[in-house]
Image (tube, grey):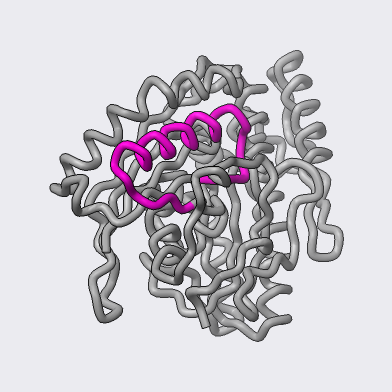
Amino acid sequence: MIAIGLEGSANKLGVGVISHPPHGKPAQVLSNIRHTFVTPPGEGFLPKDTAKHHRTWVIKLVKQAMKQAGVTIKDIDCICYTKGPGMGAPLQSVAVAARMLSLLWQKDLVGVNHCVGHIEMGREITGAQNPVVLYVSGGNTQVIAYAEQRYRIFGEALDIAVGNCLDRFARTLEISNDPAPGYNIEQLAKKGKVLLDLPYAVKGMDCSFSGILASIDLLAAELKANPGQRDPVTGELITTADLCFSLQETVYAMLVEITERAMAHVGSNQVLIVGGVGCNERLQDMMGIMAKDRGGSVYATDERFAIDNGIMIAHAGLEAYKAGFRTPLEESTCTQRFRTDEVFVKWRD
């Protein structure tokens, strides 16, 4: 069976074509194309501008994906699209495109939860069996474990997502948004040496990042006003790289803590990191140290599958389609709020 997936919940528009061979053989990625709406340094992306980008590019990407996959309309079994969560206007643009293709091609629609798409693609690519999932992106921060055909949320961000925290600090520093602000923060952090004191806000199984962002923004403003500041302990000159380093070390330590607690609770020795922030090498390293101490292992994907993409929507949608799920045209809406644990995961035992 073959599905095409359309993803556009934020500034990345993705179209992917996937094949599920018979007899439970591994899925085959036939094409996975993405185009990103990039704004100037110091700016975020507005919903209306992002939606316009998606409308401009979606047909081009569908044609490219079909050509690269070497499939025709006849070969496609269903059209999968991101139902939510995400930004309203970009989601609507992709939902309209999916409906159009469904009507033109006379194919069934499958609305997919964005978070479940990340999880299912991560499981497929890495081979992780039943891991605790850390889902970290620009819009979501959740610690998840599977039980009784639901992905149960054990902990989450109480305010802004960790990726949003990093992206907004990139705007404060006015560094490039190309290829992604979080990636550029990571590269700067690799040059940092001085660990500055920041709030550490773990509350039970949940995290809070807005206070940390406010604190690091103040430090950045002080550094801009007085570039010659030195660390009182080491005497080292404080740089913007040190700010990025300190922010990463603090927020990732918080994520490792709540993930370890979830592992202990469910008795798992596997961690699967998904979402755009999951590409971060330092987060993977820190999680790996923790997992190794517990006799466990960490699974993660590279930017092809961690950053928002169409293939994850195609994969999760095709799993649901094979389990009998369809989205009638009159119900092919989208929603900004669609929690991971709302989805009935019929395709898993």
Q: Magenta segment: does it hold 85? A: yes
Image point 63% across, 37% down: which residue?
166
Give coordinates of residue 164: x percent, y percent. Answer: 65, 37
Image point 44% across, 68% down: which residue?
123
Q: Main secondary structure of the magenta part?
A: helix
Give coordinates of residue 292: x percent, y percent. Answer: 54, 77
Image point 51% across, 62% down: which residue?
119
Q: Magenta segment: does it hold 92? A: yes
- 235 or 260, which is in the foreground? 260
Q: State the extent of the magenta-drawn residues as a range.
A: 82-110
Q: Quadrant of residue 24?
A: bottom left
Q: Quadrant of residue 104?
A: top left
Residue farthest to the right? 203
From the viewer's perspective, tell me whether residue 342 is left or right of residue 293: right
From the viewer's perspective, tell me whether residue 129 is left or right of residue 254: left
Which quadrant holds the N terminus?
A: bottom left
Give the vertical position of 311 relative to 134 (above or below). above
Image point 21% across, 42% down: which residue?
66
Give coordinates of residue 301: x percent, y percent. Answer: 41, 58
From the viewer's perspective, tell me whether residue 204 is left or right of residue 328: right
Give the vertical position of 68 relative to 269 (above or below). above
